[in-house]
Image (cartoon, rainbow, N blue to C red):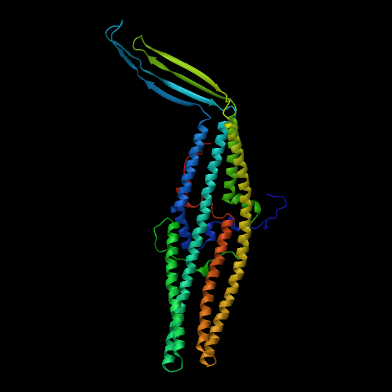
Amino acid sequence: MRRGARLPPAPADARSFGDLEWWKVFQDEQLQALIRTALEENYDLRVAATRILQARAQVTIARSFQFPSLDAGAAAPYDRATGGNRPPTYETFSPQGGFSVAWELDLWGRFQRATEAARADLLASEEFRRTVVLTLLSDVARAYLGLRELDLELEIARRTVTSRAEYLGLTRAREGGGVATLMDVRQAEQLYYTATAIIADTERRIEQQENRISLLVGRYPGPVPRGRRLTEQAFAPAVPAGLTSDLLARRPDIRLAEQALISANARIGEAKALLFPSVVITGFGGAVINGSSFGPFGVFNALPTVTLPIFNLGRLQANVDFADARTQEALLQYQQTILQAFREVADALVEVRKRREFREQSEATVAAQRDALRLSNMRYEGGVTSFLEVLVTERDLFEAELALAQAQRDEVLAFVQLYRALGGGWDVSTYAGASTWRGSGDDGS
């Protein structure tokens, strides 16, 4: 990082929001159930688990070149000839068997560096899986909270339709009695049908949001069970971000970039080793049973071979230059990932603070609109104003209530975004179902 760069301060004795387990952050029981199902069934997470298995196998493959390879073989050649100076029929049958050995000495550390790179790739695949976990937790939470906000919008719309139906019936009665005009009736009808149309559109959005959640949890589209209302979702009122050094250790994308840098650096040593001579020792030991002799006899041979690259039109040096350039790229990406992480945390902290302020102002707006509607009804009943003022005030209240629901959603989503930016929630190893994606086997070390 650049010298003199300022990082957001945090109290040293405060436990970071990102250190909390996800089931302590998301306290809605139904949301917890959805996350558990997603950790078991989500296809992106299962694909990430297969990448870990691939990387683990690559470590074993890379490490195997540091040791001799031993193969067993057997043959049974049979020859038969007739005529010439030999007897009319000449046959030989010589079964043979033994072991062959091949070993390339790792004099310059080529295989060791390749193994180091493979291990870094394995750790990077682990960090990629953790990144997927973190993204999955965030996506499920955001989708579920968005669904609860749509439920709140539907509740507001239905309540508004009921209220507007009463207005419409009252206006028609007043028009029949000669107190109201036909224009008052048409205006009441307009507001009523507008609200019913919003109900239909909200129901469509709810079903599509349920389908999105079903995909995240690895299920076919269907209804999603609900838990707490949007207004009942609880988060800590004061959220310390935590120490900046903890962020480097907690965010899996930073550690993934670090392992990519380690792997790229190891590839340089592997490429440089190809510039030097290679020594390969091959050998064979076994037994042959000659059908024309009195019995079997043993055979053994060993052949050391030295290969020195002399002319390849700069291919090997270009391979070194390529590995060096890849390392430079990995270093820059690592530095950029760190800066991006701190920027996301800073943005998320601003989001939490300002979304709370916006929600508080929206609540004040709704309270003012409700009182304005009460006053408009009194003025209309007293003959001071027209029915149009009542309808306009009621429409403004409906829009303010919908805006408040969205503000409440944005506030809880800001906490989810902060939790993700801090790298929280990826360590689910303590969860009982984690064994299905953690994989098994040795890393070859």
| Image spot of residue 385 (x, y percent) | 54, 90
Residue 146 vs 197, above or below: the answer is: above
| Image spot of residue 297 (x, y percent) | 40, 12
Which residue is drawn at the image coordinates 44% and 60% (left, top)?
Answer: 212
Left or right relative to 337: residue 202: left
| Image spot of residue 71 (x, y percent) | 44, 25
Tell me where residue 420 sits by quadrant.
Answer: bottom right
How many labels sit on residues? 0
Q: Residue furthest bottom?
A: 178
| Image spot of residue 224 (x, y percent) | 42, 63
Q: Residue furthest right?
A: 4
Which residue is drawn at the image coordinates 50% and 32% (left, top)?
Answer: 64
Which residue is drawn at the image coordinates 49% and 68% (left, top)?
Answer: 149
Left or right relative to 184: residue 353: right
Residue 10 vs 328, above or below: the answer is: below
Residue 163 vs 381, above or below: the answer is: above
Near-viewer residue (313 or 60):
313
Q: Residue furthest left?
A: 88
Left or right relative to 151: residue 113: right
Q: Residue furthest front?
A: 313
Which residue is drawn at the image coordinates 52% and 34% (left, top)?
Answer: 62
Near-viewer residue (181 or 89):
181
Near-viewer residue (114 or 442):
114
Please say whether residue 433 is visible from this viewpoint.
no
Please say whether residue 80 is visible from this viewpoint.
yes
